[in-house]
Image: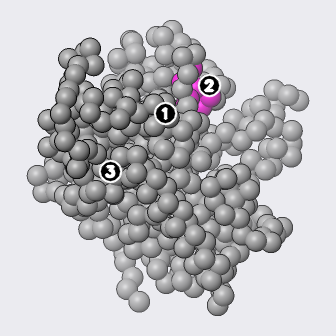
Amino acid sequence: MKRWGSSGQAADSFYQVRPDCSQNVPNTKFKIKAGKTLSVRKWHAAFTRDGCLDIASVLSRIQRGGVHPAIRGEVWEFLLGCFDPGSTFDERDQIRERRRMQYARWKQECKEMDSHVGSGKIITAPIITEDGFPIKDPLVLLEATSDTQGTSITTSGSSGNGIDVDNSVNRVLDKQIIDWKLTLHQIGLDVLRTDRTMVFYENKDNLSKLWDILAVYAWIDKEVGYCQGMSDLCSPMIVLLNDEADAFWCFERLMRRLRGNFRCTQQSVGVENQLQHLASIIQVLDPKLHGHLETLGGGDYLFAFRMFMVLFRRELSFGDSLYLWEMMWALEYDPDICYTYEETGAAVHKIEGFKPKVKSIRQFGKYERENMKNRANGGDGPVPISVFLVASVLKENSPKLLQEARGIDDIIRILNNVNGNLDAKRACDVALKLHRKYHKKLQEKKS
């Protein structure tokens, strides 16, 4: 067995950066370390002969040193709740096949509404007006296969805003379809900006796969649809999982956790609850910093918006952001997550007769165990670990913020300097400490 020194083996070769972009991306700090990182051998050894997974041993490894890139995709399917660790190989094969068929049905449904889906093309210009008329736009016609193939365009008119509309094609009257079609070009624009430093996305098939998944998701989750930032969350799934449907379901599971962040109204932004939690945590743990931020007009903590929306994708290299995510999910892991999703997800087939067994405390992540203890002591409901991760960044930069920040722009500048310098493992360790300290102070206030 190959062993590495204490510094570990670099993982950069798994996520290659284009040579012309190498100077513009942060260095990856994550190293594959023998005895700490979940290796291919340890992962395979964690399954019984029938395929049941010893999730406790897997969580312990991930929390110490992350996951070997070669098995990341299949490990994430468990961490995100696609599969129950108590399921067998045969059961998972059946579930996977059903989900692939479901995704194929949804994709076909989308393709029937707009033939760009599944065509291998990406559109970056509007294809429909808000009142349902298809747009006759040369850019669209050049970029993608037109929905009007076989139909001779005989007349055109103006939508009133200078855009040529096609009156020869039936107007779309269904508002849900109009709303969905209006998002397709925005998805395209974002896809073309997502992880473009990576060699992986030089392959246009991978770009179109990302666009297709986001287009299908926007249709099935009509309440949220598509919002900027989702492409950053979906991209790793495309990189890690070869099958498009499997990547879709991992993204769908991730969105179960995060979709609340993307629900916005005229009165509030979706991530507002987490920003309020962050404000409460800093007020308790660092009242001087909280007071300073309030004085500068940053008491709403909106400057931390991006960290929550894309889970530190902009603060870390691609490899380090994956390392951070899997540690977060391992720390928060609840072994009943898959059963919970099967019960609440109308789109997902339930496993016949499946009921969650009583779980050992070792099958829960370290952070989730702390939350269980706090709930038993009458504490408030759990706060996502991402809130304490952002709090750890603020605490680490507290002296600088107090000394140098004289306005919101200074706060943003100081936090932007974190880009590329954040240590994922240290951030998780500090987040756990802040979590314990915060709840200890709350208990002291109550007593």
Residue sitting at x 19%, y 42%: 152
Label 2 element class: helix
Q: Nearer the viewer, residue 436 or 172?
A: 172
Distance from Cα at disc 3 to Cα at disc 2: 43 Å
Residue 49 percent location from the top left of the image: 64, 90
Instruction: Select label 3 or label 2 by which is in front.
Output: 3
Query: What label does residue 276 carry, if any?
Result: 2
Which numbered mark, 1 or 2, is in the foreground of this view? 1
Q: Is residue 195 above or below residue 89?
A: above
- Looking at the picture, which amino acid does disc 2 mark? Gln
Quarter of the rendering containing residue 260 = top right
Report the label total: 3
Residue holding disc 3 = 115
Of mark 3 and mark 2, the one earlier in the sequence is 3
The range drawn in magenta is 268-274
Q: Is residue 357 left or right of residue 409?
A: right
Residue 170, percent from left and from top: 35, 35
| Mark 1 neighbour class, 10 Å CA radius: few under 14, some 14 to 19, many 20 or more | few
Amino acid type of disc 1?
Asp
Instruction: Estimate the x, y position of residue 69 in percent, counting from the top left.
Output: 40, 69
Residues under labels 3 and 1: Cα distance? 17 Å
Q: Which residue is mark 1?
A: 174
Q: Could you tell me residue 153's position as x and y percent?
A: 19, 37
Asked if residue 273 is among those painted magenta in the image, a careful observer would answer yes
- Marks 3 and 2: CB-CB under 8 Å? no
- Tag 3: amino acid: Ser
159 inside magenta stretch: no
* 225 in relation to 267, above or below: below
Crowd band around label 2 with a 10 angstrom C-alpha radius: few (<14), some (14–19), many (20+):
some
Q: Which quadrant of the view contains residue 137?
A: top left
Work out whether residue 176 or residue 45 is closer to the camera in this orientation and state it. 176
Element on which disc 3 rests: loop
